[in-house]
Amino acid sequence: MKTTFYKGIEDIFSSNRLSVYRQDGCDDTTALSRYLYNIEICKTLYPILHIFEITLRNSIDKALTSFSKTETWYDTLNLNTDSKLKVSTAKSKIKNKNKEVTPWINLVKENWN
């Protein structure tokens, strides 16, 4: 691989990002191959991570709904300031889209029916 080609790639992605793949002092071709291989690994893991994220989020919602005895646990639980701000921001974004703020479980049910 020509050094100028690799330097161009390095300018685009940043030398910091690519340096991880060169820690053993390998050549440019090997470093770029490792970078591309890492992308392929990430692509194969994406569906599993996606399913895990949804399962975790739904499990947390179900647990907090059960604990607080309301589907709108985010309005009734004693959340910290940062969490309250995030809930408020999320609600504002929903309202700005002219949509109704509904509990998460209702959104899940609507999308599965």
Image (cartoon, rainbow, N blue to C red):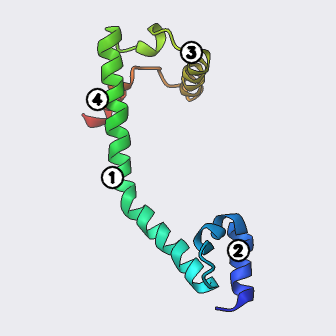
Depicted 66 relative to depicted 6: above or below: above
Inter-mark Cα distance, 3 to 2: 42 Å
Work out whether mark 3 precedes mark 1 in sequence or the reverse, and give the earlier one: 1
Amino acid type, residue under disc 3 in the picture? Asn
Q: Quadrant of residue 93?
A: top right
Inter-mark Cα distance, 4 to 3: 28 Å
Q: Is 55 left or right of 10, judged from the image as shown?
A: left
Quickly name the residue at label 4. 109
**Residue at the spot 49% in from the left edge and 25% down from the top edge:** 99
Determine whether the residue tagged by mark 4 lies in a helix, strand or loop.
Answer: helix
Given residues 16 and 85, the one toward you in this image is 16
Inter-mark Cα distance, 2 to 4: 46 Å
Q: In which quarter of the image is residue 32?
A: bottom right
Work out whether mark 2 precedes mark 1 in sequence or the reverse, and give the earlier one: 2
Q: Are marks 3 and 2 in contact (CB under 8 Å)?
A: no
- For label 4, the crowd category at 10 Å Cα-Cα, with few meaning under 14, some 14 to 19 and many 20 or more, is few
**Residue at the spot 46% in from the left edge and 15% down from the top edge:** 74
Percent across and percent down for residue 31 are 59, 78
The nearer-to-camera label among 4 and 3 is: 3
Q: Which mark is residue 10?
A: 2
Determine whether the residue tagged by mark 3 lies in a helix, strand or loop.
Answer: loop
Look at the image and tell me in which quarter the C terminus lies.
Answer: top left
Q: Is 20 left or right of 55, judged from the image as shown?
A: right
Inter-mark Cα distance, 2 to 1: 30 Å
